[in-house]
Amino acid sequence: MSETDAPLLAVEGLTTHYVSARGTRVTRAVEDVSFTLGDGETLGIVGESGSGKTTLALSLLRLLPPAARTIAGAIRFEGENLLTKSEAELRHIRGKRMAMILQDPMASLNPLFTIGDQVGEPLRVHEGVSRRGAWERARELLGAVRISAPDARVRNYPHELSGGMRQRIVGAIAISCGPRLLIADEPTTSLDVTIQAQYLSLLRELQRAQGLALIFITHNLGIVARMCDKVAVMYGGRIVESGPVRRIFGAPAHPYTRALIESIPKLGDSNGRLTAIDGQPPDPAALPGGCAFHPRCPARLERCAVDRPHDTAVGDEHRTACWLHG
């Protein structure tokens, strides 16, 4: 593959663990994760709580808490391995070339500063824009994310705005410097259904306008079907299936993926019973041997409890880690 053909982001064998203060407990949050993402593509990362989705996102940006360690792998962004970068070098990448929208906008916004100051801050830090110039640009960005009366909103503080408006403001901050990659970690969880639909439409519009590559982390397969080109399904810190959205939804290869899809409520089936996945997600600090899904899997084989399945191709760009397929 030539340099011009290389993906925007290539993650290779990424492994991140949390280690207790005494070093006696290891939580294997992300294990041997690999995927690629091209310019303008949207990748959905799905899985239950505790599957490793958020830790994966924080690993990509090198924003892990002190107890976490990325112990193996590579994160190649624009051809450069971010795991070899110093903190000073990373500060020139985060917010400018890569950006993230967190689940809780109040955790991202400082209650002591105005919206104008916070939306304009990346421009001042990364592009040397004056405070006045940053405020002017902040007004434009608020308009771009469909915030009404931007001239007034730049003077507001976060607590004066609704949850939906705060989430849009976090989006404005994320796109302020024109990043090539945007990571959105469950950005619609705290929004009601109507506001959620509006926000997703806005995010898609911004992505197309700016040519962004987007990683969308969610537990909602309906959002993945609407937003994404391809999907990676995580379980127990690993990607158990990945591929184009249409192929995954049309012919899921892994029993866990199939169970997730079957658990989606069917429109018009008011008398049908909801399908649930038996059992509980595994404790990342005490993962079972072999395939982590085997205690809950209705199709498990004897070897599933002993040997970890390899990542296997089951179609064009469609891969799974399951002994039913090799």
Image: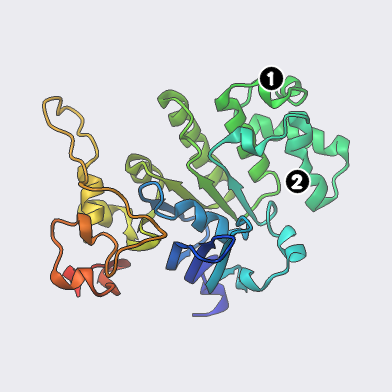
Q: Counting residues from the N terminus, which is met first, the one under dot 2 or under dot 1?
A: 2
**Which numbered circle lies on residue 288?**
none
Q: Quadrant of residue 102?
A: top right
User: Does the rendering let one see residue 144?
Assistant: yes
Say which quarter of the image contains residue 84: bottom right
Say what secondary structure mark 2 lies in: helix
Relative horizontal placement of residue 157, taking residue 306 as reference (left or right): right
Q: CA distance from mark 2 to mark 1?
A: 22 Å
Query: Mark 2 against mark 1, which lies toward the viewer?
Result: 2
Work out which residue is located at the far bottom of the displayed protein and give it: 1
When the figure is inspected, residue 239 is found, relative to residue 259, above or below; the finding is: below
Q: Is residue 252 visible?
A: no
Provide the secondary structure element on which disc 1 rests. Answer: loop
Q: Residue at x 57, y 51 (%)?
A: 182
Q: Which mark is residue 149?
A: 1
257 left or right, relative to 190? left
Q: Position of residue 253 (x, y in %)?
A: 21, 61
Q: Quadrant of residue 289?
A: bottom left
Q: Callout 2: few (<14), some (14-19), or many (20+) C-alpha neighbours within 10 Å?
A: many
Q: Is the image coloured rainbow, by chain, by secondary structure, or in one colour?
A: rainbow
Location of residue 264 in the rendering, given as x and y in whole percent from the top left corner: 24, 39
User: As drawn, which residue projects farthest toward the left?
Assistant: 271
In the image, what residue occupies the spot 23% across and 73% down? 306
Task: Using the image, determine if residue 307 lies above or below residue 243.
Answer: below
- The residue tagged 2 is 122
Q: Amino acid at mark 2?
A: Pro
